[in-house]
Amino acid sequence: MMNFSICFVNFLLLMFISLTCFFTSLYFILNDLVYFIEWDLLTINTSSIVMTFLFDWMSLMFMSFVLFISSLVIFYSKEYMSEDININRFILLVVMFVFSMMMLIISPNLISILLGWDGLGLVSYCLVIYFQNIKSYNAGMLTALSNRIGDVALLIAISWMLNYGSWNYVFYIDLMKNDFSMCLIGVLVMIAAMTKSAQIPFSSWLPAAMAAPTPVSALVHSSTLVTAGVYLLIRFNILFVDSWMGSFLLLIGGLTMFMAGIAANFEFDLKKIIALSTLSQLGLMMSILAMGFPKLAFFHLLTHALFKALLFMCAGAVIHNMKNSQDIRDMGGLTFFMPFTTSCLNIANLALCGMPFLAGFYSKDLILEVVLLSNLNLFSFFLYFFSTGLTVCYSFRLSYYSLTGDFNQSALNCMNDESWTMSKSMTGLLIFAVLGGAMLNWVIFSSNYIICIPPSLKYLTLVVCLIGGFMGYIISNVSLYFFNKSLNFYLFSFLNMSMWFMPILSTLGIVKFPLILGFKSMKSFDHGWSEYFGGQNFYFIIKNFSSLNQFLQNNNLKIYMMLFVFWTLILVSLMFN
């Protein structure tokens, strides 16, 4: 009863704050308001410590979505984590996670951003290792250390911002753009965002973080941890327009999108497929942001949060009923056992693919049409559209394996949709996964985008999606029985399934080369010749002289007689020689 009350109270509180933030953001949009609030924490003589908060339509709307999704995730956790004796601790960790994200969203100051940034990193580590096994510990360590690179970049950016006399970056963005020496801050912030949003070469931690409980995955991969980097770059977006940093970010985002799309088509773990899909969408957001469309990136960020949280919740319900099996080859015919969950899963999948008039369509289709209209190089153009086809391909593959065919587990496995609490949580997100795109389109853009392109290009997005869906069906159905040649090309399959060897390079690459080199240098130098000719040998010489001096200071007659005889013999021998 206590567990239920904590979950329910947190759910109601977060939902209330979410609705308040959403309606306030509408008011801010209509009246074009921005509030910059300073809270004077401590003043000593002329020095003061001031906490600053930035409230505009973007921060309030993002906060409302984060709080809405986290409230439903906490409500969902009440049943999903019901067998956990430490569920109160779990709920408090989730609330701390959400609080860290709030701190990051409303901060116009690099110091307070670091508080939220490091809070996300620390609490995400605690949540990833929540199940306390070797796999979770390794995944948590990989997550923490990868994000630590971004933390260091942010700390260097904070120290470099001392050149301006303040850490409130919102006042200095234009100056940074025009000052070449201050581009360093843009580079450092970009590196930090790339680590948090898992862009190449920091992508390996994101699928590994699937070791966390599914409610955490639903929260992390929709609106919190991985979106923090994209949100930070949206705030710094002026630095990337018509600059080499924007071109670099466009390339990295496109390659991440492409790599994640290919890897998802080779993966069989249900949660990892959805995680790689998140990685693909993050690459899409990064690349459209690099092209100079921050509002479009933010629009896709919000619509993606809705259907991705729903997708993870459906995956959690399926895994729960499958006795914790995550292999999609064990699934099949779920429509007969779990009609409501599979309906939600299908709708979320179609929204991810950009099915017309679902949430993902409004943002994704608009992004691709803007790409068609832009003066973009052929390679980036290929990455955009081929990755879109791959998205539809792995979505259809997931639907084929899980929803059609025969059930592949034991007949005694009782599966049903009677998890009312989880179903209610999914229903809340289902409504917004269908209506959220149109609603946000009306709210965010003051006027419609007018994109005039030839019909052949207009239909290109639809054709790419249809071809991708057909290929997903062919790969799943036909090759499963007749043309399954992946084992004949084992290295090629392993290359794509392992995200271009990135997890190996991120773990064994660090252990095998730098750490072993460091050990050998320590053994050869610090514990070897350097030790002999350095401080340790000097210490032994001083110690021996000190012992001798102490021996001589004992004022023993025998010592002086012995020394007298010794020096006499030496003098005599010298005289006779």
Image (cartoon, rainbow, N blue to C red):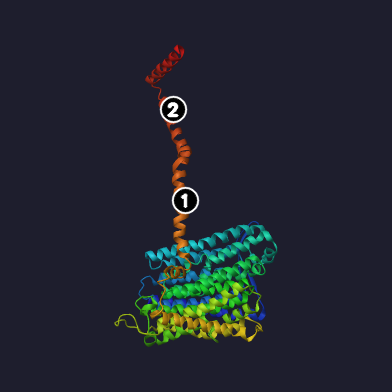
Q: Is residue 521 above or below residue 538?
A: below
- Would residue 452 be found to the left or right of residue 571 on screen? right
For the C terminus, which image quadrant? top left
Residue 400 x, y percent position in the rendering? 42, 83
State the image coordinates of residue 196 (x, y, percent, origin top left): 53, 67
In this rendering, is residue 13 above or below 197? below
Three-letter amino acid code at the position of disc 1 = Gly
Residue 164 as seen in the image, left or right of residue 191: right
Could you tell me which secondary element the residue under label 2 belongs to? helix
User: Which numbered circle lies on residue 518?
Assistant: 1
Bin the neighbour count of mark 2 within 10 Å (Cα to Cα): few under 14, some 14-19, many 20 and up. Answer: few
Residue 319 appears anywhere in the view: no
Dots 2, 1 in contact, CB < 8 A: no
Q: Which three-letter amino acid code belongs to the residue tagged 2? A: Asn
Give above or below for 387 relative to 569.
below
Above/below status of 408 relative to 505: below
Question: Residue 454 at what x, y percent from top left?
Answer: 65, 85
The answer for how far apart the CA atoms under marks 2 and 1 are is: 40 Å
Residue drawn at x 59%, y 69% is 251
Residue 478 lies in what quarter of the image? bottom left
Q: Quadrant for residue 301, please give it.
A: bottom right
Q: Residue 154, image x and y in percent?
A: 57, 61
In this orientation, which residue lies closer to the viewer: 238 or 499?
499
Which residue position is annotated with label 2? 549
Mark in the foreground, 2 or 1: 1
Instruction: Point out the residue furthest to the top here.
Output: 576
Q: Quadrant of the N terminus?
A: bottom left
Residue at 57%, 60% (x, y): give it.
153
Mark 1, secondary structure of its residue: helix
Residue at 38 percent across and 70 percent down: it is 86
